Image: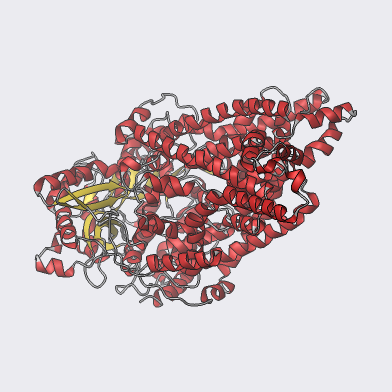
Amino acid sequence: MAGEKGTGIATRIFIHFILVLGALSMLLPFFWMITTSLKTYTDSVQIPPVWFPKHPDFTWYPKIFQQVPFGRFYLNTIWVTVGRAVPQVIFCSMAAYGFARLRFPGRSVIFICILAILMVPSQVLLIPQYFEMVRFHWVDTYKALIIPGIFSAYGTFLLRQFFMTLPKELEEAAVIDGCNPWTIFWRIMLPLTVPALAALTFFVVLWSWNDFIWPLVVTNDEAMRVLSVGINSLQGVYTSQQPLLMAGAVMATIPLLIFFIVLQKFVIKGITFSGIKG
Amino acid sequence: MMRRLVMASLFILITWGATACGSGSSNADGGKSGGKVDIVWWFPAKEQEATMKKIAEDFNKKQDHINLKPQLNAGADYYTKLQTVLAAKNGPDIMWMNGPNFPKFQSKGFLMNYDQKINKDSFSMDNYPASLVKLYSKDGVYGIPKDYDTIGLFYNKELFDKAGVAYPTDKWTWDDLRSAALKLTVKSGKTASQWGIAANLSAQEVVYPFLVENGVQPISDDRKSLKYDTPEGIEAVQFLFDLMYKDMSSPDGQYMTDNDPLQLFQSGKVAMIMSGSWMAKPYYDALKDKVDVQALPSHKKSANIIHGVAWVGNANAKHPDEVWEVLKYLGSKEVAMLQAQTGTVIPAFNGTQDAWVKAMPLNLKIFIDSTQIAEPYPTAFDPEWETPVTTHLTNIWLNKESPADGLKKITEEANAVLAATK
Amino acid sequence: MSLAKEPQLVLSRPAVKSALRTREMLWGYFFIGPVVIGLLIFTIIPIFASLVLSFSNWDGSSEIKFIGLHNFFQMFSDKVYIKALKVTTFYTVVTVPITIILSVVVAVLLNRKMRGRDVYRLIFFLPSVTMPVAIAVVWKWMYNGSNGLINFLLSTVGIDGPNWITDERFILMSVMIIAVWAGIGYNMIILLSGLQGIPDTYYEAASLDGATGWQRFVNITVPLLTPAIFFVMVTSLIGAFQVFDLVFMLTPQATGGGAGGVLQDATRTAVYSIYQNGFTWFKIGYASAQAWVLFVIIFLITMAQMYLQKRWVHYE
């Protein structure tokens, strides 16, 4: 990795200036989310907007727990997210390894078919996919929330790209040592793709956590609701209370942020580890 | 092998989904629990959830063969979800329906016609405003009216006092509105810091009421044509246009796109706004005793627009008799009273509205009185007819088309769509 | 494991060689099996269903009538959809390259050892976790023509800023700026993991050979990052062609039956049109047909990318 020693002080200041500017613009919506969750209703509908509520209103947070079973939504969301993420990362890395490293008839055709899945707008698939859930009798079950979300063309494509970059010598040596493809995959290749696995894990977690339209359509019972759907249900049909909505959003987002920070730390360790090995 | 699999799956899907296989409604397992019939009941309004749950509880205590299950569903995405589940022959037994969406769902055969049952039980539809019953009828009655809304002129008393302008009365005409709006506008430099009125682009709350007050029907009785490009129609829209672009007593269309006019009113930047009865509570929450409401100012005549929500039944419901039994209960006076007390909606059952009027210290009675002069919110059986209406109204509000040109285009394009409907 | 032990001894014998091939083939199917079967059931079958529907006039009701290629012919004279395809293409051509270039720059900057690196990474990813409603509200305020942040900043240097989201000449550009802004974080994550996956040994070897920082960047970092860049390119392009949420959020919605007018004409993308036809008007058959035309366009472009990658993407 290139260090900072080679760059002049002017360049460094410039780089920081640009980064700070970009960072500020990205912090702003998050900041708005937090302050709005502390505004009184009157403050929340002001034009021009109130940025720093003078009399913070902390009642919106407890209000959410009175109005909806928020704890239950949390558990559902965690369960759905874990249920999707763990098998997805395993299956996608397997498939990616297969497409990147093994030879078998139909490899490129099947791979292109998988890529093609990404190209169909999901809006037209909603109704046929819902049909399937009805036929499987999966409506209002965790099966509907979890199982269709496990198989990912995106994840397969992402990891394949990373397997393609690994040096061939590693495998050849392993073959000579008498390893079968599973051992090679599990013992040699996977540890080398930890950064990519972490990236995919994070995306899967992010998407499952925030997935809205699918959980909305396949569940009806309040006990089956996930956070995104639960927060959406706090909106009224005619008018909505932004502070209540934002309080829900803040509570839903914080676990994701913690997860991101932890994962990042873990990834950095993973690299130094694989770096020694490679 | 791949091809055979694909063909097989295709075949299965088509026979599954696309044909009327008449399989189960509601909850996938057909719906019986403990010898009782499950009736699933959907609504999207969070603010009414507590009332709906209470209604279900009462009903479940009253009888022993039906288990009514209320489910709050989907909020703003309610109709998207409803369409998806009904297309799959699934979905709730009883659902919340609004006027513009009713024709879409009815024309697909998703909803149950209740004429026979109404006749058999001599169930009286006279308990509800006639225009609401009409809103949910095609070749018979499909919906039991739940609640309704009409439009009023909300105003900020503090701003009126400051400008020394008398509060609106029920005798106000368009001209009174116009001169008051001018007096209430405070200019600072080239832009205003306070406007007399927000002539916001809302067909239901602003454009249609002004059209009907000038004698223009929003849609013909057979719902097959409209005529907005008459001198009366143009006069009405020109009046609103002039408030924005001539008098400048209202923020213009561009400004109201950037800044939500409802929020402008709630933050005291605007002295008057025409809004539906459902806004009474949020306005009161934001402005407290500074806000009050008056009947719309009149022109050729006094008029208003009425719209309401109804309960409709799933055409594929497994237990249509039990569904009807619940619907009758939902249409009863008892349920109407329960809804009125919460102050969120005006119940449709005649004579139960007093509780709603008393829920807030505002002149809410005008919303009830307005039903006498109100025309129903226009709907038609091809939802696409509204596209030219919103398209050209938006262009007029943004000053991209003149009121006369825009209304002419609306009339031409909407009539082309309407002529093609069955 | 036992068989693989003696490959050198037996490789010359064709029968064993083909046995090895069969073995590799079976392993290959074993590895891809779960994903392929899962996608087949939950995605590919529904995709074929939508293909079938594109030849029908299905409107959600029980009757389904097949009308051949009628939907596709109708599209040729559908000015709204043709305009939407043009808007989508323009959007893609502008946002994708800019997003990728900026993402690479940010990823490379944040891969260096520098102060506050972890905090920057977190912040650049914030738009991806922030509730979309909050993003929309804040950007709408920044874009506000009369009291927005951007026009305020412009006015300090004497520029009279435009109405960013209420003028049909500017609204698409405003949407594209947000797209780039929000896209950097996503791509950065992928590119960073690509950068981190480059073994240090390469850099060490290059340092021993006396390569400068820039030489190492050009000769090691860039080539080894190309597979990740290729991935980002393909997926960003697909994503850009399918843009919907952002447009839906930012285009003013008129009450009573969806948005309208010049602003919507300026920002209506292909998927927006599909959504409108499918969910607002119940024309599910026609919406499916529109989706398939969009699919073919994306497919052809992606295939061209796959073909061209041989020239620049560096795989091991």
Q: Residue at x 46, y 49 (%)?
A: A148
Q: Is residue B279 above or below residue B287?
A: below
* Quarter containing the C terminus of chain B: bottom left
Instruction: Judge left or right: residue A261 versus residue A76.
Output: right
Along the line of sight, the residue nearer the viewer: C2 or C98: C2
User: Image quadrant of residue A4?
Assistant: top right
Instruction: Judge left or right: residue A108 versus residue B221.
Output: right
Instruction: Judge left or right: residue B29 versus residue C127.
Output: left
Instruction: Name the spot of residue C208 as percent of width and height, x first.
Output: 88, 26
Instruction: Name the spot of residue B357 as percent of width and height, x first.
Output: 20, 45
Instruction: Judge left or right: residue C219 versus residue B90.
Output: right
Q: Residue at x 36, y 58 (%)?
A: A135
Q: Is residue A130 above or below residue C216?
A: below
Along the line of sight, the residue nearer the viewer: C188 or C152: C188
Q: Residue at x 52, y 77 (%)?
A: C70
Along the line of sight, the residue nearer the viewer: B159 or B208: B208
User: Image quadrant of residue A231?
Assistant: top left
Instruction: Name the spot of residue C83 as percent of width and height, x first.
Output: 60, 65
Instruction: Answer whether residue B193 is visible to the viewer in this image.
Output: no
Instruction: Answer whether residue A75 is visible to the viewer in this image.
Output: yes
Instruction: Name the spot of residue A77 as percent of width and height, x first.
Output: 42, 37
Q: Is residue C314 above or below residue B127?
A: above
